[in-house]
Image (cartoon, helix red, strand yellow):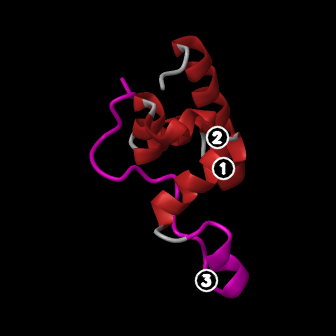
Amino acid sequence: MTANKNLLRMKYVRVIEAFASRTGCSLEDALDAFYRSQTYELMRDGISDMHCMSIDYLVEELLEERTGHPAHSLSERHPEIKDPPLCVAESGPSPYKA
């Protein structure tokens, strides 16, 4: 199923803002992380109705994708472990910077 393109873009904005707020990233870094993610690809392509999921769920998916484990579990079980850098681009320069 495909979503209305304008509604989908508005959802992208809300996910990016929520991700930035949750991680402390700048909006630019959150934008870069989102558009390089599998979560974005699944939403864009309408796979598994990811675009129908809540903003909180999608942010959790992004966090899990970037850390490799559920977003809530690592810090709860091991508070001494610092969170990995979530705002760092995975590879190469951002395609969104001039």
Q: Main secondary structure of the magenta part?
A: loop
Picture coordinates of residue 21, whole percent (x, y): 71, 46
Q: Which residues are magenta?
A: 70-98
Among the two numbered marks 3 and 2 on one chain, the one whose residue lies closer to the N terminus? 2
Picture coordinates of residue 50, whole percent (x, y): 54, 39
Q: Which residue is mark 2?
A: 53
Among the two numbered marks 3 and 1 on one chain, the one whose residue lies closer to the N terminus? 1
Contact between marks 1 and 2 (CB within 8 A): the answer is yes
Contact between marks 3 and 2 (CB within 8 A): the answer is no
Q: Which residue is mark 3?
A: 81
Along the horizontal axis of the image, is 49 left or right of 47?
right
Give amino acid for label 1: Tyr
Q: Quadrant of the C terminus?
A: top left
Give residue 75's mark. none
The residues tagged by marks 3 and 2 sit, at their Cα atoms, a distance apart of 30 Å
Under circle 2, the secondary element is loop
Residue 79 seen in the figure? no
